[in-house]
Amino acid sequence: MAQSVFSLFKDGQEYMNTWPVKRELYSFFPECRVISATRFAIKVMPPAALLACTMMFNTLGNDFLPQVLAVGLFFLSLPLQGLLWLGHRSNQLLPPQIKIWYQDVHRKMAAEGCQLHAMRSQPKYIELAKTLKTAFAELDSVFTKKWFD
């Protein structure tokens, strides 16, 4: 199913805000690293683009305006690339091994009495993110630690 770029940005923003960036998840999922890098890029790249463009324009002059603009657009595109990746990833179906693990975690959380959304037969990464966020918010760290040993 084809999605527009704007819906991917929106999904990426939602996924970035939903995914729990926890130490336990860093070795299992690339999302933690991508989210950290994207948040850093959102803060740092606009001022860096402005600084780089200003310095290049002052140094090289008006003749190199296309190159100055290209450098500025490159700097500004870095956070957008992270959001696009996150938006695409959030809509991907879970691979079989992670799907089984997700279903196991979901069942254990339901047994503990957590308020969860219904388990889907073909879960996506966004469902995994919501489940993990609920797990880290509502369950004891001793209980969640068993999943990552």
Image (tube, helix red, strand yellow):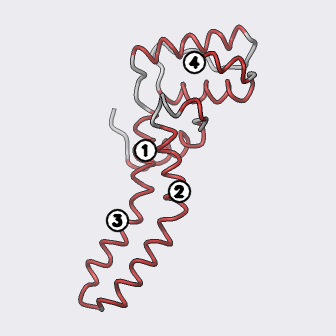
Q: Earlier in the sequence, mark 1 or mark 2?
A: 1
126 shown above or below 97? below
Give residue 140's mark.
none
* Residue 115 occupies quadrant: top right
Give residue 74's mark.
3
Q: Earlier in the sequence, mark 1 or mark 4?
A: 1
Asked whether the beta carbons under mark 3 and mark 4 sit within 8 Å of each other, the answer is: no
Q: CA distance from mark 1 to mark 4?
A: 33 Å
Residue at left offset 59%, top offset 35%: 23
In the rendered view of the protein, which quadrant contains the C terminus?
A: top right
- Residue that label 4 marks: 149
Q: Residue furthest left?
A: 63
Q: CA distance from mark 2 to mark 3?
A: 16 Å
Q: With 21 as the anchor, is 38 left or right in this view?
A: left
Give residue 8's mark.
1
Q: With 64 as the anchor, is 7 left or right in this view?
A: right
1 or 2: mark nearer the eye: 2
Inspect the image, locate mark 2, and give the three-letter code of the amino acid beneath it.
Phe
Q: Residue furthest front?
A: 149
Residue 36 x %, y %: 53, 48
Inspect the image, locate mark 3, and give the three-letter code of the amino acid beneath it.
Phe
Q: Earlier in the sequence, mark 2 or mark 3?
A: 2
Inspect the image, locate mark 4, and give the three-letter code of the amino acid beneath it.
Asp
Number of disc labels: 4
